[in-house]
């Protein structure tokens, strides 16, 4: 029985291969890919009990299977192209961000240097060393309200000085998430 099944499958393959290849080629435009699609459909048929699987027209089943497999290949290629396009855009964007980030860092250092010493110290302790206002107040022997005042002054100054970099900061945050 297995030998008979193999003969039937071989006859089926020989009878329909060329027309199915042409059909797949119409959608895919690449002979090698069309060949792979046809072979994939026949392989799946072979792996299943194909004589019992198909209850309608065998030819209609094969054409529908080739169509579906061709569409899957096209969708996969579209996803691959979309991913490559996104990656290219990201790679083009990253060097620009790196350069702008260096400019931002330089501008931040200049803006911090322009602050009064106490305000700069409070800002650096809060933002760079992640100290709480209470701990800063104890360390610098200041009241918490004074620390809050220095911090407000520093943030106001930096907001004004770094306004041109706001878009860059937002883009950087979006692309790093």
Image (cartoon, grey):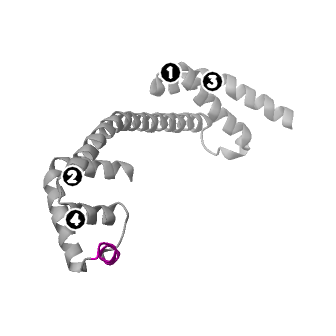
Give residue 30's mark.
1
Q: Which mark is in front, 4 or 1?
A: 4
Q: Of label 3 and label 1, which has the lower sequence position?
A: 3
Q: Is there CB contact under 8 Å for labels 4 and 1?
A: no
- N-terminal of the pair, mark 2 or mark 4, is 2
Q: Between disc 3 and disc 2, whose residue precedes?
A: 3
The answer to which of marks 2 and 1 sits earlier in the sequence is 1
Residue topped by disc 2: 113
SS for callout 1: loop
In front: mark 4 or mark 3?
A: 4
User: What residue is shown at x 33% (from left), y 65% (from top)?
Assistant: 125
What whole-number distance in Å separates the C-alpha atoms at marks 2 and 1? 63 Å
In the picture, the quarter occupied by the N terminus is top right
Mark-to-mark CA distance, 3 and 2: 76 Å
Q: Residue at x 68, y 38 (%)?
A: 45
Name the one closer to the observer, 32 or 89.
89
Indicate left or right for 83 with 21 as reference.
left
């Amino acid at each position: 029985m297995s030998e008979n099944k193999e003969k039937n499958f071989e006859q089926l393959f020989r009878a329909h291969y060329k027309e199915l290849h042409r059909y797949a080629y119409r959608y895919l435009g690449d002979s090698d890919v069309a060949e792979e699609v046809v072979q994939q459909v026949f392989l799946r048929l072979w792996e299943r009990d194909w004589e019992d699987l198909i209850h309608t027209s065998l030819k209609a089943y094969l054409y529908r299977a080739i169509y579906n497999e061709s569409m899957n290949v096209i969708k996969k290629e579209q996803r691959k192209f979309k991913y490559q396009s996104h990656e290219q855009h990201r790679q083009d964007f990253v060097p620009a961000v790196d350069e702008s980030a260096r400019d931002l860092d330089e501008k931040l250092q200049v803006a911090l240097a322009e602050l009064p010493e106490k305000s700069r110290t409070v800002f650096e302790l809060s933002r760079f060393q992640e100290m709480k206002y209470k701990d800063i107040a104890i360390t610098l022997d200041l009241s918490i309200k004074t620390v809050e005042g220095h911090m407000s002054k520093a943030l106001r100054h930096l907001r004004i000085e770094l306004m041109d970099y706001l878009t860059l900061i937002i883009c950087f945050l979006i692309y790093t998430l």
